[in-house]
Amino acid sequence: MSIDATNLLAILAMALVTYATRIAGLFVADRLALTGRAKAAFDAIPPAVLVAVIAPTALNSGWPEAIAAAIAAVAAFRLPLLATVAVGVAAVVLLRGIM
């Protein structure tokens, strides 16, 4: 297998641009003063990404997983992260045993 110089150059250029945008984000983020709606929007990004990753898997896996995900979501409003994970795991185990 041989590597074409054009393809290699394209891959390296894409890697450089990706790295540059990530590093630029770190330098720019320190200079931003977020208030009000912008701060609320940035604070909402981590939970939104987490839901976007977890929801399709939970809803396509079966009823026990979907119900356990709902139970864990409700527990997340009251419990810390580790306790929420424990509740979610216990719910999946129990529901798989029942169903």
Image (tube, rainbow, N blue to C red):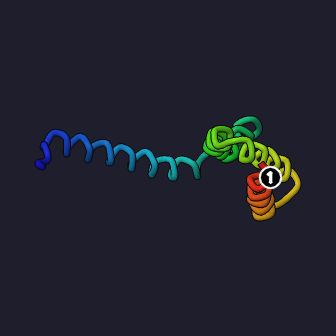
Give the x, y percent position of residue 11.
Answer: 26, 44
Q: Can the viewer see residue 79?
A: yes
Q: x, y (%) of residue 77?
A: 85, 50
Residue at screen point 50% across, 47% down = 25
Work out whether 36 lies above or below 80: above
The single residue placed furthest to the top in the displayed view is 37
Residue 45 seen in this snapshot: no
Q: In which quarter of the image is residue 9?
A: top left
Q: Mark 1 falls on what kind of element?
A: helix
Q: Residue 53 location in percent, x, y? A: 61, 44
Asked where in the image residue 93 lies, by quadrant, the reply is bottom right
Q: Name the residue under label 1.
A: 98
- Nearest to the observer: residue 73 or residue 34: 73
Foreground residue among 99 and 83: 99
Relative side of 5 to 54, left or right: left
Seen in the picture, residue 94 relative to 15 is either above or below; the reply is below
Q: How many marks?
A: 1
Does residue 58 appear to the left or right of 68 in the view shown?
left
Q: Which amino acid type corresponds to the residue marked 1 in the rendered image?
A: Ile
Check disc 1: other Cα within 10 Å, few if <14, some if 14-19, many if 20+: few
Which residue is located at x 82 percent, y 48 percent? 71
Does residue 68 appear to the left or right of 32 in the view shown? right
Q: Residue at x 63, y 38 (%)?
A: 60
Q: Which of 99 and 68 is in front in this view?
A: 99
Residue 87 coordinates in the image, percent (x, y): 80, 59
